[in-house]
Image (cartoon, rainbow, N blue to C red):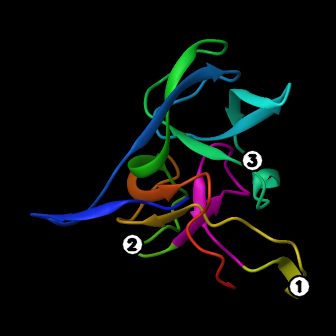
Amino acid sequence: MSLSFTQGPAGLEFKSEIVTITCTDALSKGNLVEFTLASEGFAACTKSTAAVNGPGVLMGIALEDVTAGSQGRIGVRGVFQATCDSEVAAGNALQASGDHAGNLDVASSPAGGGTTVTKVVGIALGASSTDVDLTKVLFDGIGGISSQSL
């Protein structure tokens, strides 16, 4: 799967893919979520943590505030407003934050040159000055952005 794009008046425009799903945790607009695999399918999501950076994890971005146990709209591919850590600058590759649950942060190499595989799920289109800023990102939580070595 890949992002589909066309060229519009502002340059590349990406098709958005959005789902409505039960949110186990309370979410704020822009939070990164992990889709929960159960009964051979994905029927719910939880707020993400750094522990979910593996290549087999499916992620999304909350498009609205949602109370725990309610259904909410989650973006899986496209350009969305996401909560990012304060270090994020335009052009950074992004993964789940290790410091703030539900945030995106700058993707990094495994600590100590290890072999842990992370999943790059976004490219920052703007900068974040605080850990709660909504920052525009190009996002693909299903296939990831690339398989490049960081």
| Amino acid at circle 3 | Thr
The residue identified by callout 3 is: 49
**Residue 147 vs residue 82, the one in the foreground:** 147
For the point 32% across and 62% down, the residue is 5
Tell me if label 1 and label 2 are in contact, CB under 8 Å. Answer: no
Q: Quadrant of the C terminus?
A: bottom right
Mark 3 burial class by Cα count in 10 Å: few <14, some 14-19, many 20+: many
For the point 68% across and 47% down, the residue is 58
Query: Is residue 9 depicted above or below 75 in this figure?
Result: below
The location of residue 84, given as percent across then percent down, is 51, 54
Mark 2 burial class by Cα count in 10 Å: few <14, some 14-19, many 20+: some
Task: Report which quarter residue 112 is drawn in.
Answer: bottom right
**Residue 1 vs residue 38, the one in the foreground:** 1
Question: Which residue is outermost to the left?
Answer: 9
Look at the image and tell me whether residue 100 can be seen.
Answer: yes
Mark nearer the N terminus (1 vs 3): 3
For the point 25% across and 63% down, the residue is 6
Mark nearer the N terminus (3 vs 2): 3
Query: Which region shows up in magenta?
Result: 93-108
The location of residue 60, given as percent across then percent down, is 57, 43
At mark 1, the secondary structure is helix
The residue identified by callout 2 is: 90
Label 1 to label 3, Cα distance in Å?
20 Å
Task: Report which quarter residue 71 is drawn in.
Answer: top right
The residue identified by callout 1 is: 112
Look at the image and tell me whether residue 133 can be seen.
Answer: no
At mark 2, the secondary structure is loop
Magenta region includes residue 113: no
Q: Taking 107 as reference, is 37 left or right?
A: right
